[in-house]
Amino acid sequence: MKVLPRRRRAVLVNSALGVALLGGAALAYTTVDSGTSSAASGTRVRTATVAKGTVLATVSGSGTLSSPSDTGQDFVTGGKLTSVKVAVGDTVTKGQVLATVDTTAAQQDVDAAESALSTAKANLTKAKAGETVTTTTGGSGGSTAGTTGGRGGTSAQQTPTTTTTTKVDAAQVAQAQQQVDSAETALTNAETALAGTTLKATADGTVASVAGKVGDTVSGTGGSSGSGASGTGSKSSGTGTGTGSSTSSSTTPTGFVVLTNPSGMQVTANFSELDSLKLKKGESATVTLNAQSDTKLNATVLSVSSLPSSSGGNGSSAVQYGAVLQITSDTGKLRTGLSATISVTVGEADNALSVPTAALAGTGGSRTATLVHEDGSTERVSVTVGIEGDTTVQVVEGLAEGDKVELTSTTAATGNGFPNGAFPGAGGAAGGLGAAGGAGGFGGGARTTGGTRTGGGTR
């Protein structure tokens, strides 16, 4: 067998290897390039079809849940607690007794007020009766006897007249009436204070907290502290009559007993200044609990504040406005203070022609779109739009159902589908081929996209 010289054998091996590498690269290049949409123009065109559907426009905000039925119950009259009849978790009804304080001082005030009223009424009766005055008039007496002209006679005697009159002093009556009025007011206040020693629920609810125990001294919202026989004491900061209730400045109520009730649950949310301008009373919304993302509740907008709830600070220009929404779904398991994300539907078009937002150019009610015909030709058309949804836009005029419109285009250097027009690694492979051939004289390099020759070998 004839043995080839070493140099000739190396040239043949390198030649065969080069042919194999170039063939594989060409095959892969052809396969990828055949999947491009427009090799001739060098542009990949994406289209969308005009179709009928529902277009929704929404705005989003964040807030917390609160119930207007949540109340804080406070004593009207303070004093020492004599009973606490409820505990946390108990369900109570309106009018149910929750707790009581000592009534000794309050009862003494009532007794004193009743006595003062009785005295005032007696004085008024006396003033109205007035003062009786008796006067006597007339009463000259005596007899005379004599003769006149031979004739005799006697003179008549007068009887005194007694008159009785009653004098009523109008000023005294007015003063007595004023004393009666004051006494009646004092009695009413005393009776209210006595009733205020018993704390009753002003609404149905569940006991969320109790702030004291029997033997503790509590303040009242409108009466004395009840300490001492006179029933005097320091006035509390609150005012009011009847069974008291109070809330703090936050959404969480405070009081000796706090009652919660999820019925009528609302959500107070903040929206950006731009989105707040789109909000209107009665618009529908979806409330998603942050702690339970799978819980979605229906709601409607009750009100939108015309004053900002927050303004930009520390160089920020962000301004937010608050809105209150009424939850219309079942609220039985909700709790005050839960955080939530709110999505309000500010525009809706049902069974409307629509296209993706990216298919239109321009702003306002008049836009333009690139219509793609069946033969591949394109035409720029004017489009009148309606509701601008989150991802789609309602088409009022200019397009028909089934029309195809361009979305966005990505331009390539050549029509082969690769950004730089070259098969990835082709230059390196050919360069390597040239390097391999360099040892055996194959020396043929490949030109990269930068135009420099690489991999050139030496013979």
Image (cartoon, rainbow, N blue to C red):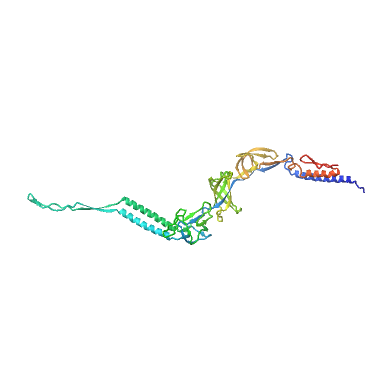
Q: Position of residue 15 (x, y in %)?
A: 85, 44
Above or below, comparing residue 255 to residue 312 in the picture: below
Quadrant of the snapshot with the C terminus: top right
Q: Number of numbered discs present?
A: 0
Residue displayed at 35% across by 57% down: 119
Name which quarter of the figure residue 312 lies in. Answer: top right
Q: Where is residue 70 in the image (x, y as percent from the top left)?
A: 52, 54
Left-right relation of 206 to 451 = left
* Residue situated in front as seen by the camera: 79 or 40: 79
* Residue situated in front as seen by the camera: 313 or 187: 313
Residue displayed at 67% across by 39% down: 371
Is residue 96 something one can see in this rendering?
no
Left-right relation of 148 to 186 = left
Q: Residue furthest right?
A: 1
Q: Where is residue 205 in the image (x, y as percent from the top left)?
A: 51, 57
* Residue situated in front as seen by the camera: 428 or 90: 428
Q: Where is residue 53 in the image (x, y as percent from the top left)?
A: 62, 45
Is residue 182 something one can see in this rendering?
yes
